[in-house]
Image (cartoon, rainbow, N blue to C red):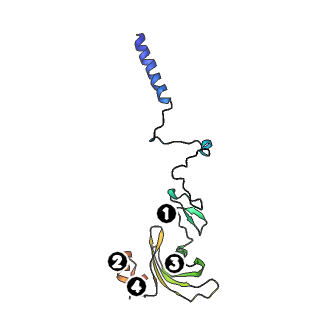
Amino acid sequence: MKKLLILTVFLPLLAITGCTRETKRTSETPAVIPPQQEENNAEPLIGGDKDEHGCLGPAGYQWCEVKNKCLRIWEEACYAGAEQEIQYRLAQKYNKPAADVTVTATKKSADYMVGKVSFAAKGLPAGGAGGLFLAARQGNMWELVYDGNGSIDCESIKLDYQFPADMLAGFCD
């Protein structure tokens, strides 16, 4: 009877105490670093790589010059509007300051935009080099489909981007 009592009372207690003991950490067990020890930890945390602006790249953050902050482009657009995004894309493409690129949308929907672009040095009248542009929204970003003054591959644009016919009027008649 005493043996049965010992087995029924003490064995479960022994098992519970064994479970609460700290187990040895293996390479597969993630380390949890208390905040007070984090500063003293010589090893950098995985995914802790930040760029020159302090953006945590491995977490998907990128620097947004326009908004002057780190953000995830799929959560928040970097630009104030579609025209500004096209302006910055064209400036980057042609290696010009964004202030020297003027974008005017002539037709715009939620997913498509058609317009004019002109390039002029700051302080000079717009009217120098420039042309037309076509853009299509791809997810949370605008993609330049065409820009310039040359001939437009209308069939490819209609097929690849499903541009509405009314948006291409004047380009692809």
Q: Earlier in the sequence, mark 2 or mark 1?
A: 1
Q: Which residue is mark 1?
A: 74
Q: Earlier in the sequence, mark 4 or mark 3?
A: 3
Q: Are marks 1 and 3 in contact (CB under 8 Å)?
A: no
Label 2 vs label 4, nearer the camera: 4
Instruction: Give the residue type that dot 2 points to.
Output: Leu
Q: Are marks 1 and 4 in contact (CB under 8 Å)?
A: no
Quadrant location, the N terminus: top left
Quadrant location, the C terminus: bottom left
The secondary element bearing badge 3 is classed as helix
Instruction: Give the residue type that dot 1 points to.
Output: Trp
* Image mark for residue 90: 3
How many numbered marks are there?
4
Quarter-wise, where is residue 162 in the image? bottom left
Query: Which residue does the image show at 55% across and 57% down from the upper left?
Result: 56
Label 1 vs label 4, nearer the camera: 4
Query: Which residue does the image show at 37% across and 83% down from the upper left?
Result: 154
Q: Are marks 4 and 3 in contact (CB under 8 Å)?
A: no
Q: Residue furthest top?
A: 1
The secondary element bearing badge 2 is classed as helix
Residue 66 pos. (x, y %): 59, 70
* Image mark for residue 152: 4
Instruction: Give the residue type that dot 3 points to.
Output: Leu
